Amino acid sequence: MMLEVKDLKMYFPIKRGLLRRTIGYVEAVDGVSFSIDRGETLGLVGESGCGKTTVGKCVVRLLRPTGGSILSDGHDIASLSTKALKAYRRKTQMVFQDPFGSLNPRMTVSDIIAEGPVIMGEGRSEERVSELLDIVGLSKEAGSRYPHEFSGGQRQRIGIARAVAVNPSFLVCDEPVSALDVSIQAQIINLLEDLQSKLSLSYLFVAHDLSVVRHIADRISVMYIGQVMEEAPTEELFAHPLHPYTQALFSSIPSLDPRMRRGLNPIPGEPPSPVDPPPGCRFASRCPKVTPQCREGKIGYVNVADRHWVRCVLCY
Amino acid sequence: MERVLKIENLRTYFHMDEGVARAVDGVSLSVEKKRTLGLVGESGCGKSITALSILRLVPSPPGRIAGGSITLAGEDILSLPEVRMRDIRGKLASMIFQEPMTSLNPVFTIGNQVEEAVRMHTQMTGKGARRIALEYLAKVGIPAAHERMGQYPHQLSGGMKQRVMIAMALCLKPALLIADEPTTALDVTIQAGILRLMKDMQEETESAILLITHDLGVIAEMADDVAVMYAGKIVETGPCEEIFTSFLHPYTEGLFQSLPGRTPRGQKLYTIAGNVPSALQFQKACCRFNPRCPLAIERCRVEEPPLVVIGPAHRCACWVRAGEGPL
Amino acid sequence: MAESHLHIAIKRIRKEKLAVAGFCVICLFALIALLDTVPAPYRDAGGMHFNRTVLDTLFQKPVERSYSPPLARTATLNRKEFTLKSTHVLGTNILGEDVLYDALKGVRTAFIIGIVPLIIASFFAVVFGLLAGYYGGWVDDVIQYVYQVLSSIPGILLLIAMLTVMERGIWQLCIALGVTSWVGLCRLIRGETLKVKNMEYVEAARALGASDGHLLFRQILPNVMYLVIIEMTLDFSGLVMSEAVLTYIGVGVEPGTGSWGRMILSADRELPNGIWWNLTGASIFLFLLVLAFNLFADVLRDALDPRLRKG
C-alpha cells in the first residue's frame, strides 16, 4: 500500500473581530478515508464544494490537516513539520488544474521545470530539462520560451514535466483536463497514462467529469460536502451505484445518444453549507429516499461488498 | 416551421497587428421557431463570435462584420441602425453567457436587473415591470422568489445566477435565445436543472434556441439540429440523431472518437493530432482541417471543399468523404 | 526567439508615436545629465584647480555684469550701455549668469531628485508590501499601522522637519523624499502580493518544498515589479516639480547646485524688472521633461499591465 488516508479532517476556522476570534468552522473535509496501491489510480469525484480539491492539497501537504492521518509507506505525514516534509515532497507532487495560472509568467519553461530539483538541492541540469520536455512531448526549443507562448494543452504538459522532474512515485492530479478542449483532453489523458506505466506512478485523480474518471481510474470515491459517500472499483460503481447521491449524479450526466434522452432529472434543493452542518447524512435534505433515521447521529462508512463501501443507512 | 434566424455566408474578421484573423469565414445556418440548433466546436473555432455577430456585439475595432447577411424575424440585421439594434437586443433576441458570476451586475439586486430588462423594452412602469420580474423569477425556479428578489448576485449560487440570467433573457419572450456555453461553468447536477429549465421555457415562449457549446453530451440532450464548426467554417450540419449516429466529417469523427466514453479502459484514447489553428493562419484557400486530418489528399491543401448534401438535411464539407455532392 | 514581457512591452510602446517621442526627449535630457556627471577638471594659468564637468566645458559662459534679454549684444548697467562678452541664447539673469547654462545644470539635479528618492522608497515599499501581503496576520497589522500613521502626517511638514534636522544637500533631500513617499506604492504591492500568493504557480512551488524566502523573491517579486516601474515613471514628474517647490520654501538643494527651483524662485525679483527669460527658460525645461515622461509613462503603464497581455 502506497498511500493510506484515514479519517482525514480539514476544518477552516471562520474568524471575526479585532482579536480574530473563531466563531465557527467550515468543515471542508470531514472524515475521509481511502487507500491507493502502487501503480493504481484512484478517482476522487464530486461537485464543486465537496472538498475533493482540499483532500488533494492535504495529501500533497499544501495544507496541514486538522485531523486524521496520511500514511505514506507507513509513515504518518499529516502532522509533520515543513522541514521534515522534504523527503515526502520528493515522493509526492501535484498537477494543477488551470493551465493559465499554474505557470509563473515571468519564468522561462526551463526555469519552471528545473526549479523543483534546484529547490531540493540537486542543482540544475539542462540535460534533465531536455529529457523531461521530451517525455511530455514538447520540443527542446520550448525551454527558452515563456508560458504565454503556448496553448492550454501545451501548458499542462509543462506542468506535468515540472511535477515529474523530482522523480515522484505519486501524483495528485487536480482536475488536470477540466480546462481543456475535448481533443486536447484526450492527448493529456494519454500522456498521463503513458507516464504512469513508464515512470511507475500512482495517481489520485481528482475530477468532476465522470467519463474521464471512468476511463482512467481503477477505483472511484464519490464525495459530497466533505465526506465520501461511496467507493468501489470503477466498473462496479457504474454497474451498481448504491448511494442515492451516486445514483442522482449518474442520472444527471447527459447521455451521448439523442435517441436515449434521459430527460435529465435534476436533484431538487440546494446543498447545505459546510459550515457547522446538521447531524446525520449530509444528503438528507435532497435525498429522494430519505427516512427519519437518516438525520440522526453519525452515518457509518460500511463495507457492503467486495471493496465496495457506502455511507448510507439504506444500503447496509 | 417558421424560420427565426437565417445567416448566410457570414464573415467576421479581426484586424490585428499580425494580420487579419478570419474568425468567422463564410458561415451559414438557420434556426426555426421552437427548435434548438446546437453549434458545436472547440475553443477558437469562432462559435462565440458568430453569436456576437448576430447581435452586432463584436468589439469593433478590431473586429468587423465583413460580409454575408443575417436575417432575424424578418429583419435584415446588418443594415439596421444602432438605435434599432438596441431595441432588438433583449427583446427580439437575447443572449446568456457562460460566466454567471460576471454577467450580472454585482451592485443591483436580481429583481432590479430583471425589471430593468422589462422596462427598457416595454412601456411598463415600475409596478408592472416588477410583476413580470417576479413571475419569471418564480418560473425559472428561484425558491421564495418574492423574498429573493431583493438579494444581490453574490448571495446566489452559480446555478441560481444562471437561472436569473435565463429569466432576464426570456421575460420578453424573444424569438431567439442565444446561449453561449450556458452550463460549462456549472456542476453536472446543476447543469441538468438548467438544461431542463431551458427546454421547459422554450415550450412556453416558443423561442428558437441557438445553443453554443463544446460539450457533445449537452448537444445530445438539447439539440434538434447540429452544426459543427472548425476554424471559422461549418464543416458538417444535420439533424441531431443523424450527426450522432452517422457523422461523416473527419473532424466530427475525431471529436466523437476523442470522448473518453468511446474507448475501453486500458486503451489509448483517440486523439486528433496537432493543435487548434489560430484564426490568422489561413490566408489561402484550402480545407482548414487538412493539417490535422488523417485522410487529407492533395486537393484538400489547395481547394476549399463546399458543404454538400449527403443525406436528408445532412451536409458535409469534405473532399474525401463528401466530394462534390450527389451525382 | 523567446518573447519575454520586456519584448512585448517594447513592441507595444513602439506603436505609440508620442510615447516614442517622449522617450527620445528623455534620452536627450539624460545625455545632458550624463555630460554633467563626467568630470573634466582643469587648471588655469594661475594654477587654480577647477572641478568641471564635460557639460561645463561645452556650455559655460562668462558671467556678464548685468542681465540681458535673449540673443542681445549689449546690456545696460547703471544707465551705461556695454557690450556683452558673448552671445547668450536665453539671455542672462539678474546676476548676469547665462540662463541656458543654468537650465542645463538643473537637468542633473532633476534626474537625481526624480529617481533616487524612488529607489529608496521602492526598497521600503517592496519589503514592507511583500511581507504584509504574504504573511498577513500581525505582521500585516503592524505594517499597516506604520504606514497609516505615516500617511496621516502632511508630507510637506514631515519633509521640512527632516530637512531641518539634516544638512541641506541633494542627497539629504533624496533620502527625506524617499522615506516619506513609500506608502502609496507599499499599498499597491501589498495588494498585488495578496493576489499573487494565491496563484497556482506559487502553490506549485510550495508543493516542491520552496521556502518562504524563495517564494517571496523568486516567485512573487518578479510578478509585482511592474508596479514599481509604473510608480517610478508616474512619480518622477511629481518629484522633479517638488524640488522646485521645496527650493522655493527654502529647504531645497544647497546653493551652487543647479536647480530649476532656484531659477523659478528668482522670478520674485526679476519679473518686476521685466526680466521674463529666466523664469521662462526654467519653466520650458521643466515642462518638456515632465511632459516627455508623462507621455512615455502613460503608454508604459498600459504596456506593462498584465491584464492586457495576450494568452
Image (cartoon, rainbow, N blue to C red):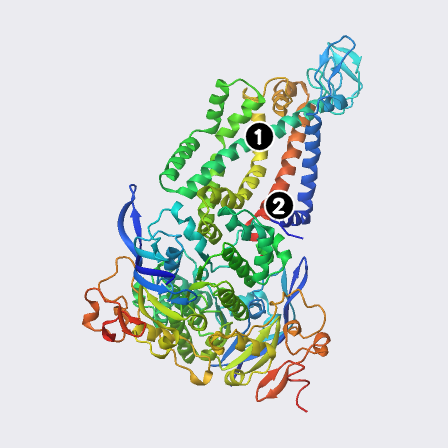
Q: Residue, x 63% and y 30% (percent of image)?
A: C111
Chain on which label 1 sits: C
Numbered disc in front, either 1 or 2: 1
Chain on which label 2 sits: C
Identify the residue position indicated by label 1 in the image.
C116
Please state which amino acid type lies under the numbered disc 1: Val
Disc ID at residue B39: none
Mark 2 secondary-structure assignment: helix
Q: Residue, x 64% and y 31% (percent of image)?
A: C286
Identify the residue position indicated by label 2 in the image.
C299
Instruction: Indicate the position of residue A237 as horizontal and vertical percent values.
Output: 36, 75
Task: Answer left or right for C73 relative to C107.
Answer: right
Does residue B6 appear in the picture of this structure? no
Q: Residue furthest top?
A: C46
How far is the residue under mark 1 from the one under mark 2? 23 Å
Does residue B58 appear in the picture of this structure? yes
